[in-house]
Image (spheres, helix red, strand yellow):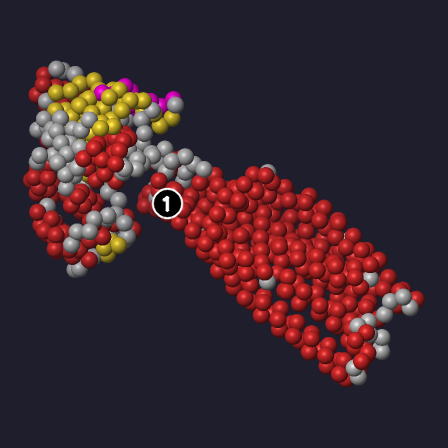
Amino acid sequence: MAIKDFHRIKRLGSYLQKDKKRLLGILFLLLPLSVAGAIQPLLVGQAISVLKGEPTFLWLSDFSLKDAMRILILGLLFSVLVRLALQGFQSYSIQSVGQSLTARIRKDLFTHAMNLSLKFHDSMPVGKLLTRLTSDVDALSEVFGSGAVGVLADAVTLVVISITMVLIDAKLGLLLLSTQIPVTLLILWLQKRYRRANYRVREELSELNADFQENLQGIEVVQMFRRETANARSFNKTGMAYQNAVNSIIFYDSSISAFIEWVSLAVVALVIALGGWFVTQGSMGLGTLTSFILYSQRLFEPLRQLAERFTQIQGGLTAVERISELLDKKVEILDVANTNNCNEKNNQLGKFSLGEVTFQNVSFAYRPDEQIINNLSFRISPGEHVALVGPTGSGKTTLIRLLCRLYEPQEGKIFIDGVDIREIPLELLRRQIGVVLQDTFLFSGNIADNLRLDSSISDESLLEICRELGLTSLLKRFPNGLKTLLRERGANISSGERQLLSVARVAIRNPNILIMDEATAFMDPSTEATLQRDLDRLLEKRTALVIAHRLATIESSDRILVMKKGKLIEQGTHHQLVSQNGLYSQLAKLQEQGLAKF
């Protein structure tokens, strides 16, 4: 585990390269800080020795009592001021570096998560992913910031205090140092146990966030089906599991703190007892004993801080492990560089792309035991309008996802204008394909931003496109037109209005291939009829792939592909398929009777 932790920290340590100079400055301050702290008990002890007329600093004998005390007090004041100033600067620098580290790692984690395929996101609840992007990254910043630097500072302080004590009195100094052995052994004993408990806490927190996020997203269903009480019980069960996990790390944390406190009190008592005996024997001065009592207290101060940072470090190491697990997730949808070697192929998909689509022996499964697409082959000619029909679960939506490279097929190839889509840069590929989904997602923000997304089109051009698509009446419903703010997922507009906006943002991009997945499902007949005329203009001279459940939407298509269990079982025009008395004919008859949809 230690070797793995070292490699993980070393890998993530590359994020600190930009702050290398600041880190070196922080480390440089460790020694003067430790010396300024270690000299204070020595000066207090000397003050007592001077008052008794027994200074161990012989050069103080040359001064009067008043002058010697003034020198020691000024020296003590100077050391305190220097230590406070250096600590303030060091603390600010450490926190600043930690925040810079957090920002860089969170940015890379977000970018990596966005590049991971839908296959990963299908199995990773949003709440769990959110925990890694927030609390895990925050815990990691403490390791590189106050945790790691703090441990080094405490180690340097221990070394300086230890050397000072041994130089003053070797026997008593070594005796005090030997008391740290049981504390160190206890820390090592607790390390593995605390680490396992902390990992469990992170996992339970992820479950808690995932449960909370799912209930908030499904609040309408929760209230409609009166699931408040049942879901509250389930959430409480998850919360209790998290509480029990937290209690376990509290136990380890409090145990080490209590043990260090007990040992430190015992050591002070031991110093007073042995030192008092040395003083009565005349082998040690009272000032020296006072210094040792103060040193014995300060000797365990770094250990107390180490115990506190122990929780930060172990939590941070757990965060490193969880973050590394996410960063190690393989990006399945690999993008190709837009190099000179690709230019010839890319030119085929430029402004004058034909829009030919070919599936060649494509097979795909979400899970090994769940084959969705099975050895599928077909070709869509440039400008051809093709409809996809079939029972639920036949693989229609999956086919669209494969064409857009949201998933990668396990077998077979997909071509656009004769070029394998894996050899086309993703930006270029997805610019060629416009997709209007049944479930439209809108971001928080205004309507104009949701229509533009990645394009730089002006407001005037946006208004012109909206007029062409018949959205003028829709925009007039809102007091601010294109500047109207939308709530999360467009909750303040209707489903039909969201679909109208979805069609508009696809039209803005002027794609060569248009895919429509039940795009008019939530529209009233009047709105659908108006939009259908505009869609006819949008579909003109473009390759179109339409998934629809209503006969009127697809019967005018150039060709209809009928799918069942991931296989293409029929294809032809509406009249050809009806005359074949196959699956399409059966579905068409049922729909005419109002008993079924495609």
User: Residue 124, how many percent across, how many down?
Assistant: 41, 38
Residue 24's place in the image compared with 64, above or below, is above
Looking at the picture, how far across and down is residue 591, in whole percent? 15, 26
Considering depth in this image, is 539 or 280 the residue closer to the camera? 280
Name the residue rendered at 60%, 70% in the picture: 84
Spot occupied by residue 512 in the image (x, y as percentages of width and height): 15, 36
Q: Does any portion of residue 95 appear in the rendered image?
A: no
* Residue at 53% from the left image edge and 44% from the top image edge: 10
The answer, for residue 216, to whether it is visible in the render is yes
Choose between 284 and 263: the one closer to the eye.
284
Q: Secondary structure at mark 1?
A: helix
Q: Which residues are magenta?
A: 369-377
Q: Amino acid at mark 1?
A: Thr
The one nearer the camera, 597 or 24, is: 24
**Magenta stretch secondary structure, dominant:** strand
Work out whether residue 111 or residue 552 is closer to the camera in this orientation and state it: 111
Residue 291 versus residue 15 in the image, above or below: below
Q: Quadrant of residue 406?
A: top left
In the image, residue 343 lies in the stretch drawn in magenta: no
Looking at the image, residue 552 sits to the left or right of residue 343; the answer is: left
Q: Residue at x 62, y 54 (%)?
A: 151
| Residue occupying the point 56% across, 67% down | 88
Residue 507 position, x and y percent, is: 15, 43
Quadrant (top left, top right, bottom left, bottom right) of the C terminus: top left
Mark 1 lies on residue: 111
